[in-house]
Amino acid sequence: MYDSDEETSLQVLKMKPADLSKHCAGPLAEQLLTVAPMRIEVEKGPETERVELLNQKSKVMNPPCPGSKGLKILLLTNHFKVSVAAKIPDFYHYNVSILHDNGKLVGSSNLRRKVIAQAHETYKSELAEKSFAYDGFKNLYTVGCLPRNNLDFVVVLNAISLKRVSGGGNLSGKESPCENDQKRHRLMSSAKTFKIQMSFVATISTQQITNTTSEQGPEKHEGLKVLDTILRQHAAKQEYLVLRQSYFSNDSKNFMDLGGGVFGCRGFSSRFQDLQGGLYLNFDVTTTTIVQPGPVINFLISHQNVSDPFKVDWLQAKRTLKNLRIKVAHNNREWRITGLSEKSCKQEKFWCKLDGGSNQVALLQQKEMTVYDYFTKVLGISLTYSADLPCIDAGKPCRPTYFPVELCSLVSLQHYKKALTNHQRRMRVSKSSIQPEELYLVLTNELRHCNYNADPLLLSCGLSISNSYTQVEGRVLSAPRLKVGNNEDLIPRNASWSFKDKKLVEPKRVQCWAVVNFSSQHYTRNFCQELAKLGAKIGVTLDPPVCVFEENPQYRKKPPHVRVEKMCEQISSKVRNNPLYFVLCFLSEKRQSPLYGYWKWKSLAEVGVPNQCLANDRVDESYLLHVLLKINAKLGGFNTRLASEMTRTIPWVSKIPTMILGMEVMPCVDGQSELPPIAAVVGSRQWPSISCYRASIHTQTRNDQMMDSLFRQVSQQEDKGMIRELLMDFYASSGQKKPAQIIIFRNGLSTTQFNQLLNNEMDQIFKACKLLDETWCPKFTLIISERSHHTKFIKASPVDNVPPGTVVDKKICHAKCNNFFLCPHIAKKGTARPTHYHVLLDEIGFSSDEIQELIHCLSYVYQKSTTAISEVAPIRYARLAAAQMLELFKSDKTRKMYPGNRIPSPSELPKLHKDVRSSMFFC
């Protein structure tokens, strides 16, 4: 349900122009009649027709268009120019199937690569001595065609080739390890046979790659895909860990301990890109996470943070170790873990053959013995601590293969795919950051080491990669002026500012508030006193708290939801007649605390009280200021505002009612795979302000990055989608004005999803607008924000980080649409990463300078910080809102336990209380 003013707004919005004069009089009617721009004839028709029109506009309206404002600066970028021969042969694409001799498909990508490599060696003449580019799955590419369109080969791999990818045998109750060792020896001595089936798929023209003026059509995309496959194959041949276009070598110098049995591993990302200046190789440093290599028991001790092997939780260890690869010490062979034994090593028994006689004799000489006795007495291996621990199982369910845990070591370069803890994330950022000078040297040395110019496939393609960084021209935009208290101007320096001797522009008074303390280690009284002192300096008045609620010690070992409920009972018993308007909550730790989600659910969904959670009681001024900024924003105040925002001089935005949307989809990455992703949209309110936002959050279809709840029509006249909620709020908070212009910032999409965005999400937004008012046709500007890229810029002389406000819109930007890189912030650690913006659609008519200035300004309206952030504030707010709702959802999920492990519908998502729904609770 919505507030009564929103329902009234809905009725007014649904009125036709002819009816407005009957129901509204004076300035309101004039505003409502004049806000909606006149529709041009070509845009009449259903929403789908307008989507098609926008698709056409996005192709012709926004070609690359460099701006001119700002101080010019010479930069270096990690794009390396690729020279292409005038005429090169076309690529030929083949579909490949690799089968065992029993007809089953080969599952291991490593084994598939070995089979293909052996086929190339064995049948070189039959294949016209063509080199292959194989992706490890079903796609194989050649430069020039093979002799026939359909080819069948039989490939034989010897024991040496199979060593790393094979593993059989067992230690079960049916057969002894001794017999299995003999079987494996016979198996490895004999070669294995594989069958390869190749069939022609298509010809990929290389003319699209060499033609720098052609559009990025499907053929050009396929050509770049072939070149990227060559890069992956180049790394795979050196037995690197290959993850998409990134590769990681087994060098301990590149490892960094993140704690908990997880290592960071530095590697490199390489990708060909077709840009405005031609074909380039984008080469960058990257980091992934791997399992701590070495003894299994060391990994488990570190992962579970215990002191010795006998304190390990083996039920948890079984889940952690499954599918990891190990190397066994006594035979130096690799296996894949399938589980653990149910009994300890000295209790788990099997039938063992005592000698290697004939089968008939051997059957008479079988003896039941434990795994421990077999390894210590038969093999003569000394075991120090494995006797009372479970065995590692590397066999099949019906034929287990057991090894004592101390003989097993985890193979290096195994990708760790689970979510990191907050501590591990901080360690990864800290240890993987690399300064510009080091980045320059590391990339230069690694590119020479790769020696791509000697790769036979790249040579046959006629490609030559420069070893020099590409020089580009950038521009440095001036920081926008800010307004603080007493109408003072504040000029940011190096994208940051201070509130020393300054006051907040619109501070709120904190009254009728309380302190809740779930931690016995925090001294709340001293913290609150220091908080009030600093608040007085910056204009925030903190009344003394109504009460300080300490948790009853008898509940500290209870489940989280019980602790929260007991605390709420304690609060309600004392403030029943005087409702609280704010709560400051102390936790032992914040996001890692099991209380966090339950407390947020209780305060935001049930009670409707703004609150701020703290994980420590530091009293230094910077931390206290950060807390005060968040509290003021949550209570509806403003810490700073743009001077142009208050003087209404922002081009296009200040004069015409304009709504700004930030959109993001956040998946659940903490291992709870049954939880769906959360889609969040924030919308500006109180126009002409661009610093205040409201969030709308829904559940998302699993593993789908496209939002499906922007428009959700439940009846002919009713829509429960996210856009309708935000439009209603804009109308109610902006003087009964409909937005004539809507600027959309969408994050988290790749370039291959741009058309899908226009056809799907934009279609939903049009429908939401039309259901409110059929005659209403706002103008749209759609901008994609991209952070997951590998483009870096550094100053040319001296080598250093780029200054904040640096924008690059030439040479290494995409050639298809108006796009640019903007780095509004200053890098606190390492090398600054710019944000890549794609102006996919612009009906409003911004110039390049205007859109770049607007985005730069939106990086300064983030209310939680005294620095410019790396992206526009609406995107950051949407991410925070999704993360906050995900915490609520996880706590609510554990209480409700949705049946059948199904995806909950949007109606089952925890609903925010009406008292906090319009607030910036996510700050």
Image: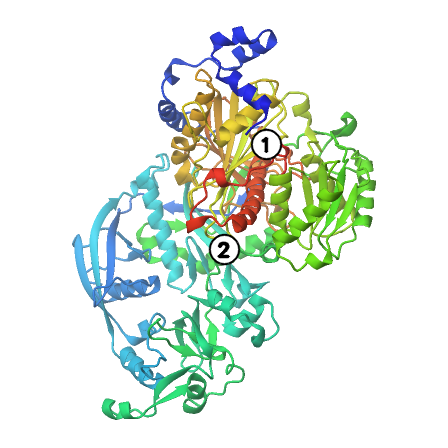
Amino acid beneath label 1: Arg
Rendered view: 392 above or below 772: below
Determine which of the numbered discs, if any, sits on residue 694 in the image: 1
Please report the residue visible at 61 percent of the width from the left and 18 percent of the height from the top: 735
Determine which of the numbered discs, if any, sits on residue 76 in the image: none
- Please state if 68 lies on the left or on the right of 274 as rendered: right
Rendered view: 265 above or below 617: below
Image x and y of residue 577, in percent: 75, 36
Front position in the image: 114 or 367 = 367
Decide if residue 739 is in sight here: no
Image x and y of residue 633, in percent: 68, 35
Marks 2 and 1: in contact by CB < 8 Å?
A: no
Mark 1, other Cα within 10 Å: few <14 / some 14–19 / many ≥20: many
Front position in the image: 283 or 670 = 670
Element marked by disc 2: loop
Image x and y of residue 541, in percent: 80, 35
- Please state if 235 lies on the left or on the right of 296 as rendered: left
Element marked by disc 1: strand
- Label 2 belongs to which residue? 671
Distance from Cα at disc 1 to Cα at disc 2: 29 Å
Image x and y of residue 445, in percent: 51, 58
